[in-house]
Amino acid sequence: MNRCADARAVAATVPGADVGNAGLRPPMVPRQASFFPPPVLNPFVQQTRLGVARRIQIFFLGIILLPIRALLVAIILLLSWSLAAISTACCPEKLTHPITGWKRKITHPVLKFLGHAMFFSMGFVVTVKGKIATPLEAPIFVVAPHSTFFDGIACVAAGLPSIVSRNENVQVPLVGRILRALQPVLVSRVDPDSRKNTINEIIRRATSGGEWPQILVFPEGTCTNRSCLITFKPGAFIPGVPVQPILLRYPNKLDTVTWTWQGYTFIQLCVLTWCQPFTRVEVEFMPVQVPSDEERCDPVLFASTIRNVMAEALKIPVTDHTYEDCRLMISAGQLTLPMEAGLVEFTKISRKLKLDWDGIRKHLDEYAAIASSSKGGRIGIEEFAEYLKLPVSDVLRQLFALFDRNHDGSIDFREYVIGLAVLCNPANTEEIIQVAFKLFDVDEDGFITEEEFSTILQASLGVPDLDVSGLFKEIAQGDSVSYEEFKSFALKHPEYAKIFTTYLDLQTCHVFSLPKEVQATPSVLFREKAMAPHSSTLAWEIPWMEEPGRLQSMGSLRVGHD
């Protein structure tokens, strides 16, 4: 009997495996709620629309307000710089001791006054709520949401505490000297030990018993549109000391302050804000939050607790986005994808799927190669089939549906990463690859010919006239495929693993749907089916599938929904 000819009948022997019917499927496990899309899809975009009337108002107000405010800001910066120069005279660039004595007593109050004057000259009307904690009560301030460079107003309202800043910022003319007067904790991008040194410095100052000024930190680490609170970095919470949360609100009809990765530039925001009659801002000092014993030992837990407290007060949701999502957005733009295509909620994806930034960035390259020809940077069923070099069939639609988590008819990058990690990679084990190879190696000679490869794919996909020559040539180095070649291809392309397991699911479900006495004697069933034309099933033709125990193990290899 021609084994390849027998295999072509497999679709007919599996209930519902014909085209147009998905067939008997194994029980599906409900999707994990933890992978549901975030309540705010893109917190890094801001689109402020200016109507004609608003543009006219900005133009005429700008003629008067813009030059006056720019002049006042310049004067205040010069005065602040001169005081900061006095305060930091003869001080080393990297402070080992706090600035004390007459320098601080004379210059610090004046710098605070100039800070208030600067924001007043820019048109900010500041409302302060709550009470500022002392250094002994709360050595660290945490400010959120962080949405603009104008958030420095929180530093002024808090009495000019120390801040965490990049080492390069102290080299900026005028601003750098003023920054040094705040005794900042400096972070270096070129020093590989910078993160460890920064954390040690924060711990040293936070546990100094009030010797150092309080430290103000923006734990989100990047600017958002204030629609949610993204992941808090743990740095401010590692010392395990009490912190005082500070809430920022900008209750204005026209948003001219939000500075995100997609939106107005620094100069545009300065011009728009300075051309407004005034800009309201609320700074609220919340009660001091003291960590529990568990939170002292777990800074991530402490950060999450504080974030939830602040989000509840702001009445906004939380998401697991972080600065790494911004880096992926930039990478997506460089790959000619929409920038928002790179958003994956990095904190959640990396933690649950054990993926680092480099791994997700590699997946972005793969995704871009598939989605580059589509509109909107999303993968449709046609692009999915073209990438796999397979026709659109019921089995392929089932696989596509497993990736398409929100059932909108397309796969975004987040769904693609989750699909590879949860659906394909678990199915791409050594055992599954061995089973799949044996499935294709119909004559059991240790090699897969193009005819065998075509026969099984035609049966599994339910497409009798399927042309797989292009896909076969991509796998094979000659006229046939060895196990090592097959394994190498499967590891590089885990998407196919789910197709293999889907086919095994169909056969296994068919076997388990038969009476138990028939399952126990597959060879009898084979002899009966072999007598009927075009009805033999591959399951009875492959010796390793004749054992009931082996069939049970096939059932255990099934991979359902995540």
Image: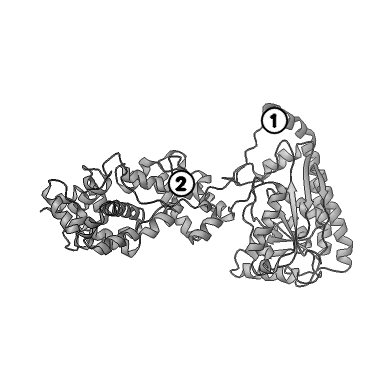
Label 2: how many residues lie within 10 Å, few (<14), some (14-19) or many (20+)?
Answer: many
Left or right: where does residue 171 sit relative to residue 120? left
Q: Is residue 75 visible?
A: no
Left or right: where does residue 13 sit relative to residue 112? left
Q: Which x, y percent locates residue 129?
A: 82, 50
Q: 365 or 529: which is nearer to us? A: 529
Q: Which residue is at 84% across, 59% downward?
A: 83
Task: Establish if 82 lies above or below 387.
Answer: below
**Mark 1 or mark 2, whichever is nearer to me:** 2
Q: Which residue is at 64% across, 56% downward?
A: 221
Q: Residue 436's image quarter?
A: bottom left
Q: Residue 291's image quarter?
A: bottom right
Identify which amino acid the numbered label 2 is placed on. Arg
Q: 514 or 129: which is nearer to us? A: 514
How many numbered marks, from 0 up? 2
Residue bearing mark 1: 55
Q: Which x, y percent locates residue 142?
A: 72, 58
Q: Which x, y percent locates residue 328?
A: 52, 52
Q: Which x, y percent locates residue 155?
A: 77, 55
Left or right: where does residue 2 sit relative to residue 22? left
Residue bearing mark 2: 405
Left or right: where does residue 326 sit relative to residue 113? left
Label 1: how many residues lie within 10 Å, few (<14), some (14-19) or many (20+)?
Answer: few
